Image: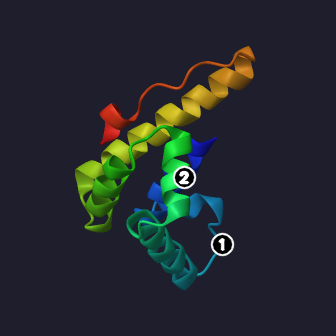
Amino acid sequence: MWRAVVLQALLDAAGLGRSINPSWPEWKHEQVKREAIEWLLGGGSDFREVCDAATIPEEAVVIFAKRLAKGDVEAKKSLIEWRDTFAKQGRKLTDDMEVEQEPDVSDEIF
């Protein structure tokens, strides 16, 4: 679950989280993007706790978030791949009703 929180924050920071609320006005999407970047780069204790619970090194998330904030196309591609892999794992869990160990994603996208 905590990896989903990190993933959603990264998607929002990259401007790729629009599908959740596509009817929002543009200013609202920009606000969500700005707040996600602030959360990812702000170094707050809740960010550190989420990364720890997600078993993703916070330093790697910060470096990756900086790339997204700069508009790095390769970082966005990697993020989309992670999102799609994450979605497939979720479908497999519900299809098989098995709990599988999550792979270490820090090597995959960061």
Residue bearing mark 2? 49
Check the image and report above or below for 75 versus 84. Answer: below
Q: Earlier in the sequence, mark 2 or mark 1?
A: 1
Image location (x, y in percent) of residue 28: 57, 80
The Cα atoms of the two marked residues, 2 and 1, are separated by 32 Å
**Residue at the farthest bottom position:** 27
Q: Nearer the viewer, residue 44 or 88?
A: 44
Point out the frontmost of discs 2 and 1: 2
Check the image and report above or below for 95 versus 72. Answer: above
Image location (x, y in percent) of residue 33: 47, 71
Q: Nearer the viewer, residue 39 or 20?
A: 39
Label 2: few (<14), some or many (≥20) within 10 Å? few
Residue bearing mark 1? 23
Image location (x, y in percent) of residue 83: 48, 42
Image location (x, y in percent) of residue 34: 45, 76
Picture quadrant where residue 23 is located: bottom right
Q: In the picture, which quadrant includes the N terminus?
A: top right
Q: Amino acid at mark 1?
A: Ser
Q: Is residue 7 left or right of residue 63?
A: right
